[in-house]
Image: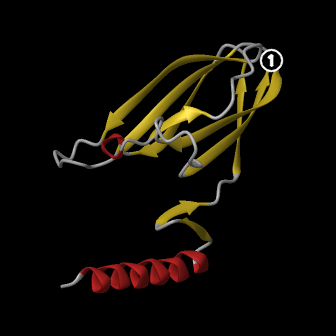
């Protein structure tokens, strides 16, 4: 198969993928699907830990990072770790687990970005945001 046919076929695949993803409420970045992020709400109490699990695949080079610094008066980062699925398959995904401790009453937004750290000029493949309300 010559290179022009391969490129043409990949272009059609991306175009077809785009149509399917738009219907399902997704957007496309290049040929990568990106789900539109909605702010999710979490309510907790002072002194409690909050666990946030984000779908990830470390084998792709992508990783979840804080998109902006935490409000350190309200929340403290306890830990962040990648937990691979126990499938035994090379390249399978997992979850990035974030644990935050509620320090004092208040409301804050925690935003994450899923990107490759060395691709500084590229937008993140995904974004997730959480509105966190800490009560007494």
Report the quarter where the C terminus lies.
Answer: top right
Q: Secondary structure at mark 1?
A: loop
The residue shown at (67%, 42%) is 129
Q: Taking 50 as reference, is 117 left or right? A: left
> Which of these two is toward me, 19 or 80?
19
- Residue 61 sits in which quadrant? top left
Colouring of the image: secondary structure
- Graded by Cα atoms within 10 Å as few (under 14), some (14 to 19) or many (20 or more), the crowding at tag 1 reads few
Residue 3, image x and y in percent? 26, 79
> Which of these two is toward me, 6 or 127?
6
> Which of these two is toward me, 133 or 126?
126
Query: Among all residues in the image, which is located at the extreme right?
Result: 106
Q: Taking 90 as reference, is 47 left or right? A: right
Is residue 110 placed above or below 48 in the rendered structure? Answer: below
Residue 41, image x and y in percent? 72, 42
Residue 127, image x and y in percent? 61, 47
Is residue 126 placed above or below 99 in the rendered structure? Answer: below
- Residue 12 sits in which quadrant? bottom left
The residue shown at (69%, 24%) is 69
Is residue 44 placed above or below 118 in the rendered structure? Answer: above
Report the quarter where the N terminus lies.
Answer: bottom left
Read off the residue under disc 1.
Answer: 136
Is residue 103 placed above or below 99 in the rendered structure? Answer: above
> Which of these two is toward me, 25 or 43?
25
The residue shown at (62%, 45%) is 128
The residue shown at (54%, 75%) is 21
- Residue 28 sits in which quadrant? bottom right
């Amino acid at each position: 198969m010559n290179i022009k046919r391969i490129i043409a076929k990949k272009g059609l695949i991306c175009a077809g993928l785009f149509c399917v993803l738009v219907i399902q409420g997704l957007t496309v970045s290049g040929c990568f699907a990106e789900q539109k992020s909605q702010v999710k709400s979490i309510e907790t109490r002072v002194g409690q830990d909050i666990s946030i699990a984000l779908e990830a695949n470390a084998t792709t080079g992508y990783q979840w990072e804080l998109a902006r610094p935490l409000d350190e008066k309200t929340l403290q980062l306890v830990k962040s770790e990648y937990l691979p699925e126990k499938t035994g398959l090379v390249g399978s995904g997992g979850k990035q687990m974030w644990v935050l401790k509620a320090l004092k009453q208040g409301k804050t937004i925690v935003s994450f970005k899923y990107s490759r750290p060395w691709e500084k000029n590229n937008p993140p493949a995904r974004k997730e945001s959480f509105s966190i309300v800490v009560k007494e």
